Image (tube, grey):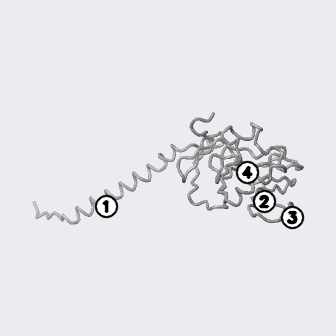
Amino acid sequence: MGNDVVDHGRRRFLTATTAVVGGAGALVAAVPFIKSWEPSERAKNAGAPVLADISKVEAGQRLTVGWRGQPVWIINRTPALLATLPQLKDRLKDPDSQNADQQPKFAQNATRSLKPEWLVVVGICTHLGCSPDFVPEIKPEPFDPDWKGGFFCPCHKSRYDIAGRVFQGVPAPANLPVPPYKFLSDKQILIGVNPEGAA
């Protein structure tokens, strides 16, 4: 037998390297497995709830998320925009949101929302399915010299106020629909699920 000398430093290095490579391999293998727990695109399009982070949406801004293959707009309304809502009642087709097909019961109120500052609507014109432009500025516009902020559909000139209520004298027949949703916190909204106690 020869004089075999064990290099303990090299052994520790090889053991540590093997552990690191094995751990990285396990992590790489786990990612697809964990991702498989998320709802598929098909399930999302079929109506699976969608979580929206609203923590960075400043006053006057809009966030768009996809739900059931449709754009859902989440808008943080300013106090100035909210103040315009009562001024427009006589110019709207359904100012009190009585058409039950366009909003759940919890949104049949002056702001069409759970919290006044947050509007959540499906961003598709109720006329022929175009996507209206978000025009939040309170100032005269070529399509309305007395514009108070809201949505303008460039396809056929339909207009909606900042609560998604449709104006009289435009092709769109109804208000923008309000999807079911609930607040999980001040930073998160879950689209596709009614709030507790709502049908």
Label 1: few (<14), some (14–19) or many (≥20) C-alpha neighbours in 10 Å: few
Label 2: few (<14), some (14–19) or many (≥20) C-alpha neighbours in 10 Å: many
Label 2 amino acid? Lys
Residue sitting farthest toward the top: 199
From the viewer's perspective, is the residue at label 3 or at label 2 nearer?
A: 2
Label 4 amino acid? Ala
Query: Could you say which is closer to the camera, residue 184 or residue 113?
Result: 113
Q: Name the residue under label 4.
A: 163
Label 4: few (<14), some (14–19) or many (≥20) C-alpha neighbours in 10 Å: many
Kindly check if marks 3 and 2 are in contact, taking CB atoms under 8 A apart as contact.
Answer: no
Residue 76 appears at what percent x and percent y? 65, 57
Residue 62: give its label.
Answer: none
Label 4 or label 2, whichever comes before in sequence order? 2
Label 4 or label 3, whichever comes before in sequence order? 3
- Residue 136 shown left or right of residue 24 in the figure: right
Label 3 or label 1, whichever comes before in sequence order? 1
From the viewer's perspective, is the residue at label 4 or at label 1 nearer?
A: 4
Q: The N terminus appears in which quarter of the rendering?
A: bottom left
Label 1 amino acid? Thr
